[in-house]
Amino acid sequence: MIIALKPGVNIEEVKKLTADLENLGVKIDASQGSSQIVLGLVGDTTVINDDALRANHLIERVIRVQEPYKRANRIFHPLDTVLEFPGAKIGGSSFTLIAGPCSVESRDQLVAVAEAVKKSGAAFLRGGAFKPRTSPYSFQGMGCEGIDLLVEAKKATGLPVVTELMEISQLELFEDIDMIQVGARNMQNFNLLKELGRSRKPILLKRGMASTMTELLMAAEYVMAGGNSQIVLCERGIRGFDNFTRNILDLSIVPALKKKTHLPVIVDPSHATGLSWMVPAMSKAAVAAGADGIIVEVHNDPEHALCDGEQSLTPGQFDSLMGVLRKYAEIEGKAI
């Protein structure tokens, strides 16, 4: 349930109203807009009398939310959520570039890529320390050593770091990581999502390869129900019948998500297509679709990459792409 208060209400009266509602057993999250306060009620709202609320002199509107996701709903939080990081942000008027290798392979490789993408204008460094692979015989990442190298690269370049968490037991290793990625395979790992809700770390939540928009938003709701609202949603492609590309990049979900939720939305053209030569076109399309940024794989030697070299841009290709995206972002009223 959403309660929109009238502009200019007395704060002490609002506190009393909030306390009275909480006594009925619901939890309340307040959102301060530019001109009014919106109260979001979560829990068993069947005990609340809508007509009595509408008669209250503080209340302008009462809305029953039909969607199962409450905290992620734009009705609940009309203003866009913007995540702030040292020297970077995701959401609002920014178009944010997250770039780096699919997996951390060595100190020299990671530092070289990190320095290159920062010079080109990337705001975040991505890199996998733990890698979920379809085959048990494929490179699984450097693990703890990979985390240490990401932190080193962060100190060397100043770029905030994004990397994937595979399981709850790894969480303590991510203390110096700026944003935790939840991969497509873990999108509905609900125990993990609950734990991340308690962690208060920013979360990059990737859409499952066969998941609906509602399922993605419900995964975000699991994290938000634990008290963590710092979430970025990521479209990374879904399964289809044609295997020419690795996945099908569903760009239609970007404007749909922007309508339904206040959370930032980014696109992963690398995993979606699996082909480096398609990444620039899909990146431009992501800007036009209204995305808040993209996450792109960049490797200094794709031919010898231990993971996903075919979909990785070289630093030179990434630099060229940045030049084009700045123009596209400007047309959409965003800045890189």
Image: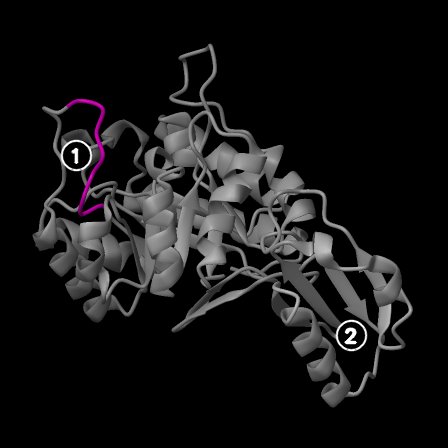
Q: Is residue 317 left or right of residue 28?
A: left
Q: Amino acid at mark 1?
A: Ala
Rendering coords of residue 6 (x, y %): 85, 75
User: Residue at position x 36%, y 30% from top?
Assistant: 276
Look at discs 1 and 2 and give the one toward the viewer.
2
Left or right placement of residue 314 versus residue 246 in this view: left
Quadrant of the frame with the N terminus: bottom right
Magenta span includes 132:
yes
Position of 183 relative to 144 (above/below): above
Residue, disc 1: 305
Task: Let me know if residue 188 is in the magenta part.
Answer: no
Q: Can residue 244 be seen in this snapshot?
A: yes
How many numbered marks does the figure carry? Answer: 2
| Residue nearest the viewer, comparing 176 with 46 | 46
Q: What secondary structure characterizes most of the magenta part?
A: loop
Q: Nearer the viewer, residue 170 or 151?
A: 170
The residue singled out by tag 2 in the image is 36
- Find the distance from the CA under tag 1 to the CA under tag 2: 52 Å
Mark 1 closeness class: few <14, some 14–19, many ≥20 residues within 10 Å: some
Label 2 neighbourhood size at 10 Å, few (<14), some (14-19), many (20+)? some
Whichever of callouts 1 and 2 sits on the residue coming sooner in the sequence is 2
Nearer to us in this view, 307 or 199: 199
Relative horizontal placement of residue 115, taking residue 105 as reference (left or right):
right
Residue 177 occupies quadrant: bottom left
Dot 2 lies on which element? loop
Task: Answer with the quarter of the image where residue 119 lies.
Answer: bottom left
Q: Is residue 192 above or below residue 177?
A: above
At a point 79% along the width and 76% down the height, the residue shown is 35
Q: Which residues are magenta?
A: 128-135
**Looking at the image, residue 199 lies above or below residue 13:** above
* Residue 296 screen position, x and y as percent: 37, 43
